[in-house]
Image (cartoon, rainbow, N blue to C red):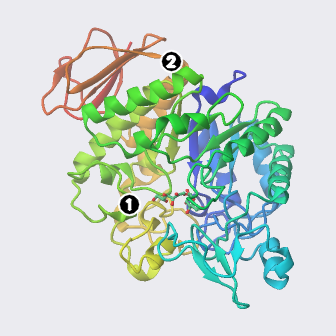
């Protein structure tokens, strides 16, 4: 791969707990992932991003990290993680791991020390009374009290105390953590809640000081050669967003504008143009993201009347037409893959899994559900263990009972069932990612005028991508159709369909 593999990479997100279970305890693990690496190779991806794999009480699915230098025993061991990195590299697959610098776990050594010794509290935000009326992003107050009467800040769950980034010890700690994993061969970090680290009297989002942290992290990454930093930066202000991607900060950041965008030609065009306009001047490659472990699965979202992604589960359970959603998700996948920059595939997207919206409340584990008093269903519905094979749960996920129940209807969606079906979502992803490797990736695009309902552009390689978002079929431009998300007959592209032409 080229020196700058990350500029045009296809990155597959592994939510380890739900990927594949190698030891039969009902939770995914490194053994399961290692046994499925050839599946990922055949899918045609360049890199894997893993959600946090560190020891964790799992109050927030592993985003409550108790030890940044080890592996959660449910997932495996540090030695196994090292073997996994080597095996992925042997297949020419890069490994990106999650780092969580905004907050820790109440079970971390530092927080336990702070509880025992009030003189050791400066690594967190402790105070005699709540310093403000901030609400936790998961609901309820952002302040909780410890037995001796002091309060500490947690922007997320009470089990996730926020670090105090005004303390140089915190900086030192995270630079050491980055080195620890770079030395073990990881190719990059996805930085959780990256804009939230600093707090002031006025707020916590996107304070200017945060950029000093990433400048320093970039220096550390650069010491190890081609290693990358990817930011989770949810900021509507594109000028502020772009600051994180200056040449001496992060390499890329997730495109949440595109992820949240409605299935609408004008909205999508606006989002794509905004993205290109934001990234081009700073020379950072855009990213194209349709889903992740925090948001509604595209098959379900695109089948609704309101096709945007809404926070707080606002659209949960609203009617969704499964066939319409599936067709649009296929078209969206080829559109995202054809755009210049890197593309993300969240596990199960390639199988066309829907959001599971009818989970019994008693099995829900996401803290959003309990913290919101049940008004927000939380994110469990996009984190259901993957269906690999067979006719009934656990669908080859492992031998134990999966930690969240899988719908019976997923027998049609297993990787095994889709592997040999040329019309399946899996085949579309495999062919699309394969062609993308040869013809697409980084670069620019040129729009083709095909009317308001159609998004059409040509890439430097000569590949043309046409998406029809109108109700009626449209004639395709001249060229050979090399891939389409739906049936193309007599040179006509149906509604909600994408075609690639050379
Ligand atoms: O998410 C950050 C974040 O702001 C989320 O709360 C987001 O707004 C929400 O999930 C959208 O539905 C990151 C992780 O991706 C998430 O899984 C963690 O729960 C969170 O940080 C805390 O670590």
**Kind of element beneath mark 2:** helix
Q: Quadrant of residue 277?
A: top left
Q: Quadrant of residue 477?
A: top left
Question: Would you say residue 45 is visible in this rendering?
Answer: no
Comparing 251 with 167, the one in front is: 167
Q: Position of residue 94 (x, y in %)?
A: 70, 38
Comparing 7 with 210, the one in front is: 210
Give the numbered dot on residue 410.
1
Which residue is depicted at the point 65% across and 49% down? 191
Q: Position of residue 444 (x, y in %)?
A: 48, 17
In the image, the residue with mark 1 has its CB under 8 Å from the nearest atom of ligand 1 = no
Q: Is residue 155 above or below residue 429?
A: below
Q: Position of residue 326 (x, y in %)?
A: 30, 46
The answer to whether residue 125 is left or right of residue 442 is right
| In front: label 2 or label 1 | 2
Tally of marks: 2
Say few, some or many: other residues with alpha carbon within 10 Å of mark 2 (under 14 / 14 to 19 / 20 or more). some
Q: Position of residue 65 (x, y in %)?
A: 71, 66
Q: Which residue is mark 2?
A: 439
**Kind of element beneath mark 1:** helix
Q: Quadrant of residue 315?
A: bottom left
């Amino acid at each position: 791969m080229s020196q700058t593999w990350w500029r045009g990479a296809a990155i597959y997100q592994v939510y380890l707990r739900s990927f594949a279970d190698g030891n039969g305890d009902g939770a995914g693990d490194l053994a399961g992932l290692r046994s499925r690496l050839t599946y990922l190779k055949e899918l045609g991806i360049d890199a894997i991003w893993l959600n946090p794999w560190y020891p964790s009480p799992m109050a927030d699915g592993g985003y409550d990290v108790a030890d940044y230098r080890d592996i959660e025993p449910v997932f495996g061991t540090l030695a196994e993680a090292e073997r996994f990195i080597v095996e992925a590299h042997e297949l020419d697959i890069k490994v990106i791991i999650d780092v969580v610098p905004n907050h820790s776990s109440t079970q971390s050594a530092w927080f336990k020390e702070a509880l025992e010794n009030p003189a050791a509290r400066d690594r967190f935000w402790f105070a005699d009374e709540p310093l403000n009326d901030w609400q936790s992003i998961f609901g309820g107050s952002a302040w909780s009290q410890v037995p001796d009467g002091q309060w500490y800040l947690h922007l997320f769950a009470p089990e996730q105390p926020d670090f105090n980034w005004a303390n140089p010890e915190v900086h030192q700690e995270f630079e050491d953590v980055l080195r620890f994993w770079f030395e073990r061969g990881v190719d990059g970090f996805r930085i959780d809640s990256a804009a939230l680290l600093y707090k002031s009297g006025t707020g916590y989002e996107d304070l200017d000081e945060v950029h000093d942290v990433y400048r320093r992290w970039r220096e550390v990454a650069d010491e190890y050669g081609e290693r990358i930093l990817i930011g989770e930066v949810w900021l509507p202000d594109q000028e502020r967003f772009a600051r994180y991607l200056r040449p001496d900060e992060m390499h890329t950041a997730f495109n949440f504008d595109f992820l949240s965008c409605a299935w609408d030609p004008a909205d999508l065009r606006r989002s794509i143009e905004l993205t290109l306009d934001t990234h081009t001047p700073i020379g950072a490659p855009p990213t194209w993201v349709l889903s992740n472990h925090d948001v509604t699965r595209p098959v379900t979202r695109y089948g609704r009347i309101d096709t945007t992604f809404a926070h707080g589960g606002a659209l949960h359970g609203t009617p969704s037409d499964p066939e319409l959603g599936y067709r649009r998700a296929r078209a969206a996948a080829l559109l995202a893959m054809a755009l210049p920059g890197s593309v993300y595939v969240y596990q199960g997207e390639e199988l066309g899994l829907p959001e599971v919206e009818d989970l019994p409340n008693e099995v829900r584990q996401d803290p959003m559900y309990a913290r919101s008093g049940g008004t927000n269903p939380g994110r469990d519905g996009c984190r259901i263990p993957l269906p690999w094979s067979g006719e009934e749960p656990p669908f080859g996920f492992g031998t134990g009972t999966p930690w969240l129940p899988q719908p019976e209807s997923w027998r049609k969606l297993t990787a095994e069932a889709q592997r040999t079906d040329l019309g399946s979502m899996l085949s579309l992803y495999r062919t699309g990612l394969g062609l993308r490797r040869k013809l697409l990736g980084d670069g620019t695009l040129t729009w083709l005028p095909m009317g308001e309902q159609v998004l059409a552009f040509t890439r430097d390689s000569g590949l043309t991508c046409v998406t029809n978002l109108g109700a009626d079929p449209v004639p395709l431009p001249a060229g050979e159709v090399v891939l389409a998300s739906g049936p193309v007959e007599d040179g006509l592209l149906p509604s909600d369909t994408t075609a690639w032409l050379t």
